[in-house]
Structures are given as structure tokens and as C-alpha cells.
Image: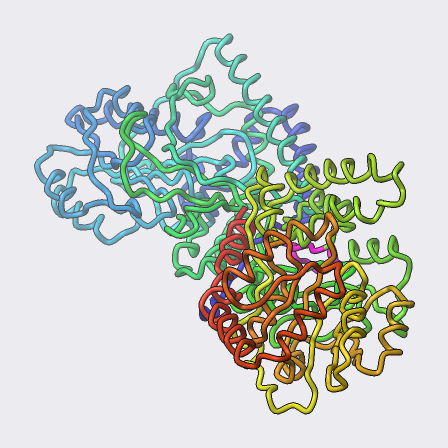
């Protein structure tokens, strides 16, 4: 078994206080559009000058976007000093940065950066040294690091005439570490990157720099088109936020795929072009409302970033600046993420830079992210919560591989097995089961209250409830234990009017439901073929290697036959009893382990002195019976629900105990048992044939030892759960990351 791995999942949660404030802010923005634009602009300048850059109000210039501000600054730089001919820009930035510099008459030279978008400082220093009056654009993709790095001082010493443009468009924060200086201007923006709002931006440029930023008034038609575009962006953004809030409130957080293609700005939309136009009325009104909460937005961004980094188990240093984007580490990039993902940058639409990490967008103010242990819950409405397949195979495997593992089902009380939680839902007072619809309803409520996102269901009657859980945003794995369509055909064999249509109707519903789920597990190859369209995972009912030691019953005073499973005639107990009555040996015993719903059969078994009815026995105690047994029985009757099986859990348990096996002569079982040499098959509806086979086995101890040893060897090398559990882990990883 593999060692335990700590797993966690990142969940979206709604910030309810921000939802109400967002509605209020939207109303204030609409009202603000009716006020004089100068009022809003003065408030914005004052806020940014005092709280962000520590300069004078008149040294803050407002444009329709950060890109327009960059264009206005570059034109002002060119006008102030004609010797400024070359602009150095990082190689990862989108087209508009280089476009703004070229539009102002600069020659653009790209300087290389590493995977974290940090400049190649020595190479940049050498280039700057050779220029007369270079302009260096320091864009901060994930924070303010490049513009505040000490290497900037080295560039100043290399060329005292250098002018820096600190592009802080993605990281406007209170008391920014990047400040305007006599040889440095700061370009900023206020939009969805830094605070909720439509496009708007500007620059902080000190008077002593000698630069007068340029403004260009667009024609009326142009301004009208831009105003319409901004209004559309504002309204559509509010609608998207509203729909996402509804999804989160109903537990259906959206997951986003990591983009494979790089992101480029094409500058085709009117409010994204490079013309240095003044800020528009709607943008100014929205910024005036949003900017007072700038520190709150930064704090929320940091909380979200730290939550992601805790979930990924990576260093938290990148979150400290409160940047709106968080670089994704390599491992999560291959999966799906709960937050929007920003694509990698590239130089042009045809040449992306290899190795650039995509980034999580963590600046959604109405969303917070929580890190929880990744959990998988087994749900059952009919099985015991200590069932072998459910507890000892599925749940224990999930727990061993780092998941929080629990089982939810009807039981008398809560419990635990190792690290697996056993939740009684509903609680069976006095062992009495309530009406089945009530059980299903209680299980549905219990599943929602558990806080678990991934459920593994084990009963066909739970399918309608599982579909409701799926609608509530939960992930569902359907475990198909049996061919239920064939079982219905057997159940209704005496009711032709039901048998003619109900099994087919059930199969259509079951197949459709399975396709809506996130994963399907089948117990054998026949079921896998039926669910072929769902790409099922075949996980047979194999015991664990530590299930039981080999039997050592040769010294027992009685010859013990053992049957483990549901006690019913269709599973062969009636035929086993008839065969026992044909054998006169007084030392012969039939041990029946399990429960059933046929009172007459149970009464017959209890009336036979050579039958020992054990009832339900815990899986961990079965070895006490197996080690004293001589032959294992699996006499399934020739019904539609059984003839297609090629193995069963009881057969492999008999092999694990080193018992020779006598089972039904169905084609799949015959190949599985007789070809491997671990037992015999027999016509399971013929008591005389069963008795003859048992008598032959009783008479030949060497044959029993050979068969038992063969079965035990096959169990240890192939037919054990430990060998195949990796398929379940892979399925859980796929489903939990979906």
C-alpha cells in the first residue's frame, strides 16, 4: 500500500457582505454619473495622491485606461527631450505597451526576463549604458517587485539620463512601494485588476521631472461609441457577477480550465485603443466609489492568494504584495482550477514565450477561497456501513491516499475504523429501519450537511437522490455492484406484465444517470461492457492481503463447509441444505454467515442440527471462521442476474483463506475456477450433483490442499485489492480535480 499523502481541495465561498455592498456601489455609480465629472475626478486624484503615491493632487493625471495613460506619458517624454529615442520594454508584455511607445515615435527594444518575469538585469544594464537617454518600462506582472528592486539603482548609475516608467496597472495598492520620482513616473489603472469597475487609469508624474503628459480629445462620435462600450461592459460585468453569486449561493462554484494558448491584447475595442483620451464619466464615477475600499480589496486578494498557496503547499511570498494574479505552480497547471485563470503572456500572436506560468485571478471581491482536506464520502442506503467493498476497499483506500474518508448510511450509531469516519444517517433506533423514502431523504440532507464535494454511491435506488446532489454541484461516482436490469427480470419472472417493460425502463434510466455522473465503477467485465459509454473503471471485489491467514482445519473434529453472503434461495443456500441432507456423515457442518429476508429458509436452516447460522459477522472477524473451514460454497442459481458473473467476493475470499471452492458452473465462473485449479464447478440446481462433489472433496485431503494452495497463491499474486487499488485512486484524483 502506498504511503499516505496529504491532499487538499480549494473551495469557493461567497462573501455575503460584499454582495450587498456591490449592489449598493452599483447604485451609487449610476447616481454619480449625473454629477459633474470634475467632482469625481478631483476625488480620484486626491485619493491616489494621498493614499497611494504620496504626491500632490495636481501631479496625478487621469486617462480612460492605463494604456492610454502610457501613451500620453510617452508622447510627453518625447516632447520634453528629443534625445529620448529608445524604449526598453520586457519581452512578456502584451502588444499595447510596445504599441504605445511606437506611436510616440520610440524605437522599441525588448529585454529578456525569466519565468517569473524578472528582468535580466546585467543584460539590461549593458544596453542602457550604450543609449543617450533611454526610457525603461518596468512592468510588474504579479506585483511591484521589478520597479522597486535595488537593481534599478544600478541602471541609474550606468546612465544618469535614464527615465523609468513603472507600470503598476495590475497592482494599485495603498502606500505603494513604487513612487514617482524626478526620473520615474508610475502608470496605474483602476479596473477589475485592482478594484471592481470599468476601465480607467492614469499616471503619477512629479512636476520636477519636466514631463507634461499629453491628452487628446476624441471626436464626439468616438466618445459616444466608447461610452456605450463602457456601459455595456459595466452592465454585463454586474450580470456575470450576479449569476456567479447565485451559483456560489447554491453550492455550484465554477471551475476554470487552464488555458493552453497565450493571451494577447489586440486593441480592437474602442475603449482599449492607444489614444491618450481623458477618463470617461462612467469610469470616473465607478472609480470614485471603489477606490476608498482599495485596502480592503488588497486584503481580500492576499487572503485568496494565501488560500491557494496553502492548498498547493507552495511558498507564500508571492501573495504578500496583494497582486491580483497569483502565478500557478507547475503541478496544478495540468488540472482544473476553481478560480479564473489568466493565460500566459507572449510577444506576438504567433510567438509565445515558453515557460511563462499562467496565473490565478484572485481579485474577485465577492469570492473567498477555503482550503479543506480533499474528502470522499461513500453513500449507501441498503448496505451496512461496515460492508467489505465500501469500508475495507473504497473508504480505506481513500484514507490511505490522503483523502478525508467517511461513510454515510443507516446505522445504529456513529463510529470509526482507523481514520475512516462512519456516520449513521439516519440513526436506526433499536435497529428498526424507517420507510425507505425517508432514509433517502435523510441521506440527501446528511450529504449536503457533510460539506463533502465528492460522493461514491453504492445503491441503485439512490440514483434519483444522486442526480439531485449533482444538480447541487457535487461530484458523483456510481459503483455498479450487480446487473440490476437482469435482477429485475428475475424478480418479476412471475409477473409478465412488469417483466416486459420495467427492466428496460430501468436500464434506460440507469444508463442516462450514469452518463451524467463524474465516474463509474463496475464490479466485473460484463458490467463494464454494459456501461462502456461511461468509460468505467473495473474494480473487482478482491479482499486485502491482510484479510485472513490460510486455513488450518485438518485437525478440526468436524468437516466444515462455509457460505458467506446474502442468505437466500437464489444464492444457493436452499440447494446446499438439500445436498447436506443427502450426506449422512455426522461430522459434516454447514456454516452460514450472513442475513436474509426469507423467514422460511432461515427456519429450515436453524432446524437442521448440522447447520450453524452465524448471522452477520464483521469483516475483521471472518478469518476466525475461514481458518477452521474445509470447503467454500458459491452455489448461485441459474438466474439472469447471476449467469454472467465471472467471479464474486466470496469466491476470492475463499481463495484468500486457501479453501477449495465448489461453485456454480456458469461459463465465467467455470473458467475462473476450474482453469486455475482452485476448485470445482457443479450444476448448482442439482442437489445430488452437489452432494457427490462434496463427498469427493471430503474423501481427498491432498486434493483439497492442492486446490487451496493454488487459490492462495493466485490471491497473493493477482486477486487482491492492494494490487488494483491504484485505479480507484486515479479515478478519485480525476473526479476531485474536475
Of 189 and 99, the residue lying toward us:
99
193, above or below 154, in the image? above
Whole-percent x and y of residue 685? Answer: 75, 58
Q: Is residue 249 visible?
A: no
Is 432 rendered above or below residue 230?
below
Q: Position of residue 211 (x, y in %)?
A: 29, 30
Magenta region includes residue 448: yes
Would residue 28 be found to the left or right of residue 354 on screen?
right
Q: x, y (%) of residue 653?
A: 60, 70
Q: Quadrant of residue 130?
A: top left
Q: Position of residue 401 (x, y in %)?
A: 51, 65
- Which residue is farthest left? 130
Residue pictured at 27% horizontal, 47% vertical: 118
Question: Does 478 sit left or right of 440 as displayed?
Answer: left
- The foreground one among 514 and 426 is 514
- Residue 71's place in the image compared with 392, above or below, is above
Q: In this view, does 670 lie above or below 192?
A: below
- Label count reads 0
Give the quadrant of residue 425.
bottom right
Q: Which residue is drawn at 53% across and 52% down?
A: 731
Quarter location, residue 233: top right
- Taking depth in this image into account, of 285 and 271 the one nearest to the observer is 271
Residue 637 visible in the picture: yes
| Span colored in magenta | 446-458
Query: What colour scheme does the image use?
Result: rainbow
Residue at position x 54%, y 12% in the image:
224
Magenta stretch: includes residue 158: no
At a point 64% along the width and 39% down the height, the residue shown is: 515
Amino acid at each position: 500500500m502506498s504511503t499516505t499523502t496529504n491532499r487538499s481541495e480549494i473551495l469557493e465561498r461567497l462573501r455575503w457582505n460584499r454582495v450587498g455592498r456591490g449592489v449598493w456601489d452599483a447604485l451609487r455609480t449610476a447616481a454619480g454619473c449625473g454629477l459633474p465629472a470634475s467632482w469625481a475626478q478631483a476625488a480620484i486624484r486626491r485619493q491616489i495622491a494621498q493614499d497611494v503615491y504620496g504626491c500632490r493632487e495636481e501631479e496625478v493625471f487621469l486617462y480612460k485606461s492605463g494604456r492610454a495613460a502610457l501613451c500620453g506619458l510617452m508622447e510627453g517624454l518625447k516632447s520634453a527631450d528629443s534625445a529620448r529615442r529608445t524604449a526598453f520594454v520586457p519581452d512578456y508584455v502584451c502588444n499595447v505597451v510596445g504599441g504605445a511607445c511606437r506611436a510616440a515615435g520610440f524605437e522599441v527594444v525588448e529585454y529578456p526576463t525569466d519565468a517569473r518575469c524578472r528582468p535580466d538585469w546585467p543584460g539590461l544594464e549593458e544596453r542602457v549604458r550604450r543609449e543617450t537617454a533611454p526610457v525603461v518600462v518596468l512592468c510588474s506582472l504579479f506585483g511591484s517587485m521589478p520597479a522597486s528592486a535595488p537593481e534599478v539603482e544600478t541602471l541609474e548609475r550606468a546612465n544618469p539620463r535614464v527615465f523609468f516608467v513603472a507600470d503598476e496597472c495590475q497592482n494599485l495598492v495603498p502606500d505603494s512601494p513604487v513612487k514617482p520620482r524626478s526620473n520615474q513616473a508610475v502608470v496605474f489603472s483602476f479596473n477589475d485588476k485592482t478594484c471592481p469597475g470599468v476601465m480607467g487609469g492614469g499616471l503619477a508624474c512629479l512636476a520636477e521631472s519636466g514631463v507634461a503628459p499629453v491628452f487628446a480629445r476624441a471626436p464626439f462620435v468616438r466618445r459616444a461609441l466608447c461610452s456605450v462600450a463602457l456601459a455595456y461592459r459595466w452592465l454585463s460585468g454586474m450580470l456575470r457577477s450576479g449569476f456567479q453569486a447565485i451559483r456560489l449561493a447554491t453550492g455550484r462554484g465554477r471551475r476554470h480550465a487552464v488555458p493552453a494558448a497565450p493571451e494577447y491584447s489586440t486593441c480592437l475595442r474602442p475603449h482599449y485603443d492607444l489614444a491618450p483620451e481623458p477618463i470617461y464619466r462612467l469610469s470616473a464615477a465607478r472609480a470614485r466609489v471603489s477606490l476608498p475600499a482599495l485596502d480592503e480589496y488588497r486584503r481580500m486578494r492576499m487572503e485568496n492568494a494565501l488560500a491557494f498557496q496553502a492548498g498547493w503547499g507552495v511558498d507564500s511570498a508571492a501573495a504578500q504584495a496583494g497582486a491580483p494574479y497569483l502565478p500557478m505552480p507547475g503541478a496544478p497547471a495540468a488540472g482544473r482550477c476553481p478560480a479564473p485563470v489568466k493565460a500566459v503572456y507572449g510577444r506576438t500572436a504567433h510567438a509565445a514565450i515558453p515557460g511563462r506560468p499562467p496565473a490565478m485571478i484572485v481579485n474577485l471581491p465577492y469570492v473567498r477561497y477555503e482550503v479543506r482536506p480533499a474528502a470522499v464520502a461513500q453513500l449507501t442506503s441498503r448496505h451496512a456501513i461496515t460492508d467489505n467493498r465500501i469500508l475495507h476497499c473504497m473508504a480505506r483506500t481513500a484514507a490511505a491516499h490522503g483523502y478525508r474518508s467517511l461513510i454515510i448510511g443507516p446505522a445504529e450509531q456513529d463510529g470509526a475504523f482507523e481514520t475512516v469516519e462512519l456516520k449513521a444517517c439516519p440513526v436506526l433506533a433499536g435497529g428498526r429501519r424507517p420507510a425507505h423514502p425517508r432514509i433517502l431523504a435523510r441521506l440527501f440532507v446528511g450529504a449536503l450537511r457533510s460539506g463533502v464535494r465528492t460522493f461514491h454511491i453504492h445503491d441503485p435506488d439512490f440514483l434519483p437522490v444522486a442526480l439531485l446532489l449533482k444538480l447541487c454541484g457535487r461530484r458523483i461516482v456510481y459503483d455498479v455492484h450487480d446487473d440490476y436490469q437482469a435482477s429485475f427480470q428475475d424478480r418479476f419472472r412471475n409477473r409478465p406484465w412488469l417483466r416486459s417493460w420495467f427492466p428496460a425502463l430501468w436500464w434506460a434510466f440507469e444508463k442516462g444517470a450514469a452518463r451524467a455522473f463524474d465516474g463509474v465503477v463496475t464490479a466485473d467485465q460484463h458490467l463494464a461492457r454494459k456501461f462502456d459509454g461511461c468509460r468505467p473503471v473495473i474494480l473487482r471485489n478482491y479482499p486485502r492481503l491482510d484479510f485472513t491467514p490460510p486455513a488450518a482445519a485438518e485437525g478440526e473434529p468436524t468437516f466444515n463447509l462455509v457460505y458467506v453472503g446474502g442468505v437466500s434461495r437464489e444464492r444457493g443456500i436452499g440447494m446446499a441444505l438439500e445436498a447436506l441432507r443427502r450426506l449422512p456423515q455426522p461430522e459434516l457442518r454447514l456454516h452460514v454467515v450472513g442475513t436474509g429476508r426469507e423467514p422460511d429458509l432461515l427456519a429450515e436452516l436453524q432446524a437442521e442440527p448440522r447447520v450453524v447460522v452465524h448471522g452477520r459477522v464483521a469483516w475483521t472477524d471472518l478469518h476466525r471462521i475461514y481458518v477452521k473451514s474445509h470447503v467454500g460454497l458459491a452455489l448461485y442459481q441459474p438466474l439472469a442476474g447471476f449467469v454472467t458473473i465471472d467471479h464474486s467476493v466470496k469466491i476470492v475470499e475463499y481463495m484468500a483463506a486457501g479453501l477449495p471452492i465448489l461453485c456454480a458452473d456458469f461459463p465465467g465462473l467455470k473458467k475462473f475456477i476450474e482453469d486455475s485449479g482452485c476448485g470445482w464447478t457443479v450444476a448448482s440446481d442439482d442437489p445430488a450433483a452437489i452432494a457427490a462433489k462434496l463427498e469427493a472433496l471430503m474423501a481427498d485431503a491432498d486434493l483439497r490442499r492442492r486446490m487451496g494452495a493454488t487459490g492462495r497463491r493466485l490471491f497473493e499474486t493477482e486477486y487482491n485489492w492492494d494490487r488494483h487499488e491504484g485505479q480507484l485512486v486515479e479515478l478519485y484524483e480525476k473526479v476531485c480535480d474536475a
